[in-house]
Amino acid sequence: MLNSDKPKPTAAAKSENKPTTKKPPTKNNVGAKGKPVNKFKTAGKRGYEGKNNKFAAGGKPQAGQNEVSEKQDWTKFKQEKKELKLKRKSNRDTYEVTQEVKKIYEQVKCRRTQNKDKLVEQMYKILNVGDTISKVAKAHDTARVLQCMLKHATPALRAELSDKLMAHAVEMCQSKYAHFCVQRMLKYGSPATKGKLVDALLGNVVRLSGHNIASKILDHIYLNGTEKQRRYMRQEFYSDLYKKSKDDDVHTLSDTYKDAANMKASIMGAVKANLDHIANKNLVDNSLVHAVILEFMQATDEEKLEETVTALAPLIPHMLTTKDGTEAAIICFYRSTPKNRRAIIKNIKEHLLKIAIHEHGHVFLIALLNALDDTKATKKAIYDHLHGDLKTLVANQYGRRVVQWLVAPGDTTCFHPGFIKTIEQGLAYGKKEKQARRQEILEQIEAPIAQTIAEDPAFWLSNSHIGLVTADILNHITGEKYIKAVTALAPVVTAADWRVSTLPTEGAAQNKKKPHDVEAYIAEATKERKNKNQINAGAPPPVSSDEESDSEEGTTPAKKPKEDEAKAALELPTVVGIEDAGMHHVLKKIIKNDQKHEAAPFGTQLLQHLSSDVLKSWLGINRACYVLVKLVEDSPAQLNSCRALIEEHELGEVLLSEKSSGAKMLASKLKK
């Protein structure tokens, strides 16, 4: 209320009391006479109105000339860019030559083209000028031209072309595109050409082993090379002394210091440095590197070995692809500290299934299972991760060995004595007694295995290979787990429609002989392609082959499954289960081991589930009669049950009328 008596200030007074500070004129808002200019107030100035002002009409952009000009400028820009690119290409000294060769290449890669070797000769005459061939090999668009030439050239021209490239072999192995030409030389070249290529790479083996692209080529050369070539390649890891000169007396790392013990420290240091360099680049997935690692681990002392083990622990999964790498990985695990062992197990967890079904990796997994003292941790870290893929393991020839070692470790009926002796060397690095460790593992896994068998018993008797694993499992599990498993398996055996697959021996397709001569190999492939085209006459082949161009570039095209292969996969050859020779052996093995268990539940279950029709059909099968003989000869209770079953169904005369040796023996056993 006291403030209400005061007069209110007028607008003029407010303006007088207001501070009169003005911003100093800047360079951007000063006019021609030094006065400030309000750029938003000027209504007709150039730059804010007219054809250059897109916001002149009501604040909306005007469509028209500006957009048209921008579009025309963009088209012009693309054209200029295209012309610039063409100009740069034309400035190369090989431009005209490559353009001419590409035209011929389009004809050569066509499937219908005849006399391709003559076209390749024309291409070679065009390219055989100076160092044009070496330049062409490194370009992305012309490298495939050389690949095509190496494939379709005559042997003499192929050798001549390879000799031209031989001087640049080291650079080509490291090139993104040229290394495909090296692969073609290795695939289609003669033995003499391959030998020259290996000689050209010697002296640079360690450097190439540390290169991401070249290491794959060295791996292929080492796997397919002669013993002398392999020895020379390993020697370059031993020391720089062997890069320029090789020693035929040095076969392994220990031979380098055999006559000069004072050289051991320097040589081992050089090998360790080379291996550390490659390990730091994660390029240990190489058979050559695996061989050197194994030699180093077998020759080095404990101190340097511990450092190498620590460096290689994260890379163990990459070392399990070869025999030497697996042996080195096993030594790594045996000599590791508990901390490094946990790290190794952690690193292989996500690759367990691949390791378990691998030709060499499964050996490492068995060695690991045999050496670990903590059985609970073993089950949790390994078996629990594999349990969901138990069927996949049992269906694979190497995975089966892992399952068999879990339930029957050291069993000579499952494993070769030499293999058992090698694996049991790892017991020296454990503290727990061997039998106690193995029994603890079996007690933990027998229940889940029995449950898996009970869930799908037909799978576990689907062929003789899987059946042998099933018999080994039944031989070692006990108590209720055994009864649960055989109770589920017996109805499968006695089913009238029980059939098993007669798969060929695994790896038989891989052992099939292939033509070693390059020309015969190409001729056979061409013949197969022509036959395929004749069969599919309704759908003629395309003029050009994308598949061929992709293979020349080094990429693998996606292949569609053939109808015949799909039908073959669905219609596997099968035979009546009781007639199969392999399954006959499996059933006799299960029945023999059945006598160890109380009440012999498998035999009892078989007799209980045998119907009149199935029993009548069995009496007419020789092998089925022998199964019944095995069933009754060691068990008086089952003998009486079988006799009563035949009398009940009135099949005595049927049995006596059969002429097979099994039926006669069964009749003699059942005779009172």
Image: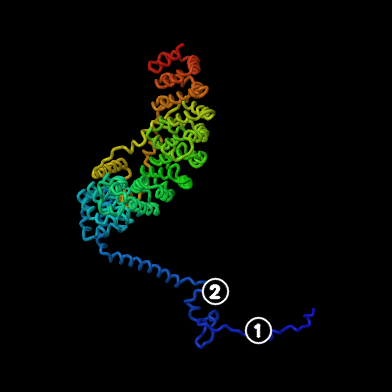
Q: Position of residue 171 (x, y in %)?
A: 29, 57
From mark 1 to mark 2, how far is it between C-alphas?
36 Å
Q: Is residue 347 above or below residue 85?
A: above
Q: Is residue 672 visible?
A: yes
346 sits left or right of 546 in the view: right
**Of 173 and 36, the residue lying toward us:** 173
Toward the right, the furthest residue is 1
Provide residue 618's location: percent of width, then percent of height: 43, 20
Q: Which residue is mark 2?
A: 58
Residue 98 higher or lower than 568, as above or below: below
Residue at the (42%, 48%) spot, across then down: 306
**Quarter of image, res 630:** top left
Element under disc 2: loop
Q: Return the residue nearer the eye: 525 or 238.
A: 238
> Pointer 1: what residue?
18
Q: Badge 1 local density, few (<14 within 10 Å), some, or many (20+)? A: few
Query: Looking at the image, which residue sits at the far top?
Result: 672
Label count reads 2
Between 228 and 501, the residue placed more toward the observer is 228
Say which amino acid is labelled 1: Lys
Dot in front, 1 or 2: 1
- Kindly state the secondary structure of the residue where label 1 is placed: loop
Please provide percent x and percent y for residue 364. 41, 41
Q: Earlier in the sequence, mark 1 or mark 2?
A: 1
